[in-house]
Image: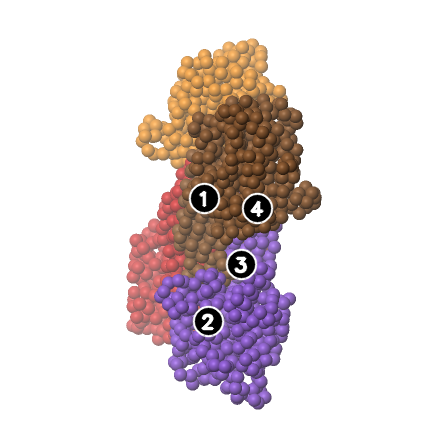
Chain colours: A orange, B red, C purple, D brown
Amino acid sequence: MTAINVIELRRDLHQHPELGLTEFRTASIVVQTLQNLGYRVEYGANTMDAKYSLGVPPKAVLENAKQRAIRDGADPAIVEKMDGGLTGVVATLQGKQPGPTIGFRFDMDALPIEESTNDTHLPVSSGFRSSYEGNMHACAHDGHTAIGLKLAEVLSDGNFSGTVKMFFQPSEEGLNGAYPMVKKGVADDVDKMFCLHLGMGVPLGEVVGGLEGFLAMTRLQVEFRGVPSHAGASPEEGRNALLGAATALLNIHAISRFGTADTRVNVGILQGGTAANIIPYHAKMLVEMRSEVAEVNLELRRRVEQIIASSADMHGLEYDITVVGESTTMKCDDELIDIVLEEAKEVEGFQTFTRRGSAGGSEDATYFTRRVQELGGLATYILVGSPIPAPHHNEKFDIDERSLILAVNLFTRIARRVLR
Amino acid sequence: MTAINVIELRRDLHQHPELGLTEFRTASIVVQTLQNLGYRVEYGANTMDAKYSLGVPPKAVLENAKQRAIRDGADPAIVEKMDGGLTGVVATLQGKQPGPTIGFRFDMDALPIEESTNDTHLPVSSGFRSSYEGNMHACAHDGHTAIGLKLAEVLSDGNFSGTVKMFFQPSEEGLNGAYPMVKKGVADDVDKMFCLHLGMGVPLGEVVGGLEGFLAMTRLQVEFRGVPSHAGASPEEGRNALLGAATALLNIHAISRFGTADTRVNVGILQGGTAANIIPYHAKMLVEMRSEVAEVNLELRRRVEQIIASSADMHGLEYDITVVGESTTMKCDDELIDIVLEEAKEVEGFQTFTRRGSAGGSEDATYFTRRVQELGGLATYILVGSPIPAPHHNEKFDIDERSLILAVNLFTRIARRVLR
Amino acid sequence: MTAINVIELRRDLHQHPELGLTEFRTASIVVQTLQNLGYRVEYGANTMDAKYSLGVPPKAVLENAKQRAIRDGADPAIVEKMDGGLTGVVATLQGKQPGPTIGFRFDMDALPIEESTNDTHLPVSSGFRSSYEGNMHACAHDGHTAIGLKLAEVLSDGNFSGTVKMFFQPSEEGLNGAYPMVKKGVADDVDKMFCLHLGMGVPLGEVVGGLEGFLAMTRLQVEFRGVPSHAGASPEEGRNALLGAATALLNIHAISRFGTADTRVNVGILQGGTAANIIPYHAKMLVEMRSEVAEVNLELRRRVEQIIASSADMHGLEYDITVVGESTTMKCDDELIDIVLEEAKEVEGFQTFTRRGSAGGSEDATYFTRRVQELGGLATYILVGSPIPAPHHNEKFDIDERSLILAVNLFTRIARRVLR
Amino acid sequence: MTAINVIELRRDLHQHPELGLTEFRTASIVVQTLQNLGYRVEYGANTMDAKYSLGVPPKAVLENAKQRAIRDGADPAIVEKMDGGLTGVVATLQGKQPGPTIGFRFDMDALPIEESTNDTHLPVSSGFRSSYEGNMHACAHDGHTAIGLKLAEVLSDGNFSGTVKMFFQPSEEGLNGAYPMVKKGVADDVDKMFCLHLGMGVPLGEVVGGLEGFLAMTRLQVEFRGVPSHAGASPEEGRNALLGAATALLNIHAISRFGTADTRVNVGILQGGTAANIIPYHAKMLVEMRSEVAEVNLELRRRVEQIIASSADMHGLEYDITVVGESTTMKCDDELIDIVLEEAKEVEGFQTFTRRGSAGGSEDATYFTRRVQELGGLATYILVGSPIPAPHHNEKFDIDERSLILAVNLFTRIARRVLR
């Protein structure tokens, strides 16, 4: 077996971006690589509790994704065990001496963004642009997964006292990948938990020991049902689901700012209607709300639900609201931040060492870290800087691949230090 | 060859409803039936001028529809000649003596409505509910096509002086089927043109000799393009296409009523956004406007276009507007109304004879009738009553099949009378 | 006493335009003129039942209007009896012989429009522009009242068999002037009722014997009450009445057109909020809906009320809805139309004689005509043509004063004919 | 002359609340009191540069306010010199020895809120509820002014080295009172500037030495002008200003949150339309935007202006936008915070000593402090805690009057310390 080239691996993953809960090819590679390295590997129903899975894609979508993954090299037997979107992977390796358990969490999913075809975009000029049209790794998870596997390779020597446990999580973007893993209990034996992100506007050579400020988040799927009617002959007999949805959309965005906490609302998707001459009698929306304070996020949700109910009433519609994703807030432990910064100072290439930072988005890694902390363990979330030519979630997003090597070296030192 | 059973034929068509410009199975049956009856039959590029075709479905949709049609019995050779949505059929039969040309126009397309599964709905209880899930003959075009073919059978004896010309038109619902046929010149030699509709709230036994009041109609497809951004980290960097679209939708519906003419507006479809956590950067709308006065319809279009332009400006969006369907108004000729009512009085089963009626919807048969009238011919649009358990375009719409026989008998008499 | 110059009188009234229920000066002139002519004159509480008065202006507004009227020549004693907006006047004259009772109804109120100052506008160039800034006779009621008084003068000779009864009605624009008069019973003894309008796009010399098509109308006053809060420090604690009102406004205008009848909706007034830095906690709207079919108007009202209720719920507001004006539809009697057209043919200056016409607006004269018809009498509504340089309710609206004389002559002939 | 009772004085001011730029009675009392105490007092055009005055109320409003002030005891001569809304007062006293100049700034204006009539509200039960119906001191400025005058009295002994300069500022709520004073140069000679607020959710006995986090603010007055038309007869000829305004209102509230800074938007007032049956052709809005970052506030303003322009275009309207108020951000100087906290520790009644706090609202005292700092001086903004039974700007807002005495004592010590 030849050593993993972290950059080549990242580029292969970049070229095959899979959306949340359909990471069949990615997870299959993860499973096989870790098995080959001698780890004990669990996946499918052993790593995710299906009854806590939210927002699982429809059967046809899963089926297509599975076929595509197998076509592009995934192991059919592994893929089959991941059916129903159970694409999480957990790998464990006992060190040569006993000791505590360290956990590392990496995310694997991509985004529904069409990657740029501009040849100033490195994946284009270097030939590893997404081959799955309409999907793109625009948030560095390709890098995260590659780092995780390279780290696994380095640590496969077992030269440490304790246990290394690695979590490869699906659907971070959907915020519905971590929750069913944590509910399955996979993180219950972890003593010290480390999570990772690359990029986020921080320059190469800078490390942030404890990234916090993640926003509590709720995602609601909304369905409006009206009554169809011919738009020319008898429009008044229809009940217009799109009028209800558009009214809700505007008013959701118009929810008051809060004096007590930063908030976000977004109606990310709206789809409704069937034909030009039929009063639209069906509409679906995907709504997201966030706040840095969990209680404020609850109040946002209450207001969104009221707006939806009233918009439906206003237009004589029925409606359903379903939660399809959630995350919470986090607090990094000082003791782990100390470790991160001390070890980073020993890694060539880091020059700037920041204790704490604040993120603007949401992260369901927070379910892992909260669980570990609840059970008396410690946790932190590390940011490794990387220049990005365009913002996260943009069609020209990219990372500086030198950050991959910095991250592998840092995490290796952290593992050896914690399991010393 | 056994005689056509108009009710069985209608039920077969009902069970295989095909959307506008994809009527491959229906048109294939029409072609073969008419050829067997001895008519000269034209179809494909001989009946429709592709450069006047608006709103042709994407290649993949056409391909799927062709495969399905062939699977369900369509002739692959005929289907192939109809590629690109050229599903119009024109059949001609010379009578035993010379004389004028009479034209009959029938429409073949179905609607994107999911048919009711309630067993009080006759197609359910009698086993001919749509087998093409999501599509439905909810506007009686299955009946129209069956009537046309039965009429063709009856007239195939050639016992008349002149020429019978039958037009089987696609995509009346899309209002984009008649226009490319008329532009091809297929109606240029018609002296007297008769069109037909069943139902429309008129009871069994009533006939309306001249149905008018069709609304001039324009359909616009609109595309908004914004800028994606992460909804949590940097929402302000996005340009939100759904906010623009929802603003446009509400304001389009809020366009003033006119004191000078009846009007209609509908945003039949709105689809936008890609994910909950990305500011939606793309949205599409299908907008329809109508008026009983052609100039007012133009003014409606001007206002809709202004609203779209301003909504885009408001939210920093780019946009495109494309016309995808159009129809005009009509005026029925007294001489033909006289003929219709006189002949109807000779058909057993008609008791009520109404000269003129006013429809609320739009019809692109108006392109046929206007063309015939422009060239000095006469035209009318006949309504044959039929009880309907639910409005047109409703999932429980149905017709009383006795009206099929009444219509065949009436049209036969009209043909023999005009070509006497 | 010198004879009334109908043009001078009209110009005086034009210069002193008074809004609905504040026509203190106008009504005072009407009372005094009619008393001088020998009519029995009733006004104040004798002509209007206050408990059916809707939308009476606040005390301060009434008080100001009364002061202004007195300042400009109104009789203080008469004005005082009209307090509370009871500005209707009814005058009766018995002819020399007994006979039936003929009724004539004229309206007196002006509009809250600022009259043009452009010197192409006749009232400007001829020096009789409104001296009550912000108010204007922009719907010809100044002409109607002048015609009524001149007609009264001509008929004061008593040379007829029966009774002449003249109704000078306030607040036609508010549609709240006729109802309390009719409820008082003032029209109960009328056998034949004639109403009048000038202008409406019909040319000089044309008369329409029966103007119909008035729309049933309802006016609702809406109040939203929220919660104030500081817009910078704690906006989330407010409940924003203007967000509720704006949502209602857009959705009211977006109510579906009806296939069954022509409809209108208008939010004529919206006022809310108190300061830039306070979440607006109060808003008021005046909403109007109309239809040519009374049942459709009821359904419009139901939808408006639902939209208001849902907009309030959506934003945590309380609300009240009050009816402040109403009118109904009308049907003119053939027998009276015959009389109108026959007599018009005898008046020099009329050349075009139209039986029936259709109006687009609403009229509360319909309460007078409906009451007369309910009790077995006959009624019609006459339109006397007059060129208008700008539409009704426009700041440059004006009438051709020759129409005043035509109308007086026509009405005189009608009175003598009916009371022959 | 008897000593000032700060509580009685505050209650008198509370009972006579005057809106921004109409503080004629308040300012008259301030002028007379300070003159009696021996200060050199400037006011009217000597303290405010009229050409930098924004949002001055109309003449009629000023006139009414002046009459009311004179009726309630203001000196007519003083009031006259304040015409045009020049109600700012500046008082100077030289100490017995030379030294630096200390500045104190207090605000005097009230809010357009109707004060509660509930007898649990102290001003009700103790008989000093607002006698100016619809206005209320709901932000403690009555207390600030009373503190300022009592402080002036205490310092009138001249026992200090240097100069005391006191600024009594109008219209803090309008954010248009400080700017014309600062532009007049009144603060140019101040070395150390102290501002004050009571309440703001901080308990009695707590003092915050440096209150920051004020939001940069801009207030825009917007006018939309459309075209009137009769809402029944020809609604399509109107251009509806309220549809434009409601569209703007919803979209202004829907402006994206910013990842880079906290923001606020509010449409505080919307007024439009004239009558139920006229398409509303005029509307006015008062819009406010704020951010903790001045550049973000500029971007908010750009977006608001774009929304207004597009809403106007959408509905065929003309529009104007006028800036009527502005404020900026601030930074408190450490040296003054030290002084405040050290002196507060010597005042009986203070137990909690907080260095810095963050406010959520806006303050135009920031123009005073920025000017002093620009010229090399120092500035801070002190918060003196007081329990409040309801939020600022609420109809039940009140302060604990014990905080008045604490504030006077603290400010006295600060003055003596700085001018030691």
Question: Which amino acid does the dot numbered 1 rest on?
Answer: Leu
Callout 3 and callout 1 share a chain: no
Label 4 close to label 1 by CB (< 8 Å): no
Asked whether residue D321 appears in the rendered view, the answer is yes
Report the front residue among D335 and C106.
Answer: D335
Q: Quadrant of residue C130?
A: bottom left
Report the front residue among D162 and A175.
Answer: D162
Residue identifier under label 1 = D54
Identify which residue is drawn at 47% across, 79% down: C4
Numbered badge on residue D74: 4
Question: Taking B133 as reference, is B198 above or below it?
Answer: below
* Distance from the alpha carbon under mark 3 to that under mark 2: 33 Å
Question: Taking C354 as reference, is D395 above or below it?
Answer: above
Report the front residue among C361 and A409.
Answer: C361
Chain for numbered disc 3: C
Q: Quadrant of residue A162?
A: top right
Residue identifier under label 3 = C287
Mark 2 residue crowding within 10 angstroms, few (<14) / some (14–19) / many (20+): some
Quadrant where the image shows the N terminus of chain A: top left
x, y percentage for residue B183? 30, 59
Label 2: which secondary element: helix
- Point out the frontmost of discs 2 and 4: 4
